[in-house]
Amino acid sequence: MERVDKILQHPVFIKELAHIGELEKERRYCRHSIIHLLDVARISYIYNLEENGGLPKDIIYGTALLHDIGKGIQYEDGTPHNISSADLAKGILADCGYNEDESQMMLEAIYLHRKFVETDNYLARILYRADKKSRACYSCEVCEECHWDETKKNLSLDY
């Protein structure tokens, strides 16, 4: 996954991920670390395999790695992170060798990942689901205090 490795080594990705880590170091709830990003990537890839989605692995992983990369901007100026993440991802994807069609699909998935939306973009649908399923509420020490709706919490292991 050469292009995914390029994302992981991209200076903007590295800088923004470190920035998020610094801003979330005292956060008690779910964080947006590389662990979360890779959990989302792996669950998305499982969905793709189980559902015969046909998406290339590096498209799925690249999208998942970038879907929350604008979270630090949200913390600082209030820009919704789906928007700031898509903005940051556009340049990163171009630098890492994704073509225009791939980038468009990936950016749309990043932009749509916060809320369920009916879309023909399969990548957007699996990213949304994986992002929600990635949260390990079943083993969280602050689950009772979490602001997530009880019906959305993952109280058992599915993936």
Image: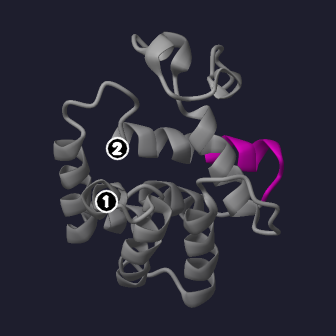
Position of residue 95 relative to residue 33, above or below, is below
Q: Residue at x 75, y 68 (%)?
A: 121
Residue 159 placement (x, y as % from top left): 64, 27
Residue 118 sits in which quadrant? bottom right
Residue 8 sits in which quadrant? bottom left
Q: Would you say residue 74 is visible in this rendering?
A: yes
Neighbours of disc 1 within 10 Å: few (<14), some (14-19), many (20+): some
Q: Nearer the viewer, residue 144 or 48?
A: 144
Q: Earlier in the sequence, mark 1 or mark 2?
A: 1
Identity of the amino acid at label 1? Leu
**Which residue is label 2 attached to?**
34
Whether residue 49 is in magenta: the answer is yes
**Which residue is label 1 attached to?**
8
Identity of the amino acid at label 2? Ile
Position of residue 141 relative to residue 74, above or below, is above
Neighbours of disc 2 within 10 Å: few (<14), some (14-19), many (20+): some
Position of residue 78 relative to residue 136, above or below, is below
Q: Secondary structure at mark 2?
A: helix
Quote the CA–CA distance across marks 1 and 2. 10 Å
Q: Nearer the viewer, residue 85 or 8?
A: 85
Magenta stretch bounds: 44-53
Q: Residue at x 40, y 69 (%)?
A: 84
Residue 56 placement (x, y as % from top left): 64, 63
* Magenta span: chief secondary structure: helix
Residue 55 placement (x, y as % from top left): 70, 62
Position of residue 84 relative to residue 100, above or below, is above
Whether residue 47 is in magenta: the answer is yes
112 sits to left or right of 121: left
Residue 134 placement (x, y as % from top left): 55, 34
99 sits to left or right of 19: right
Q: Residue at x 54, y 86 (%)?
A: 99
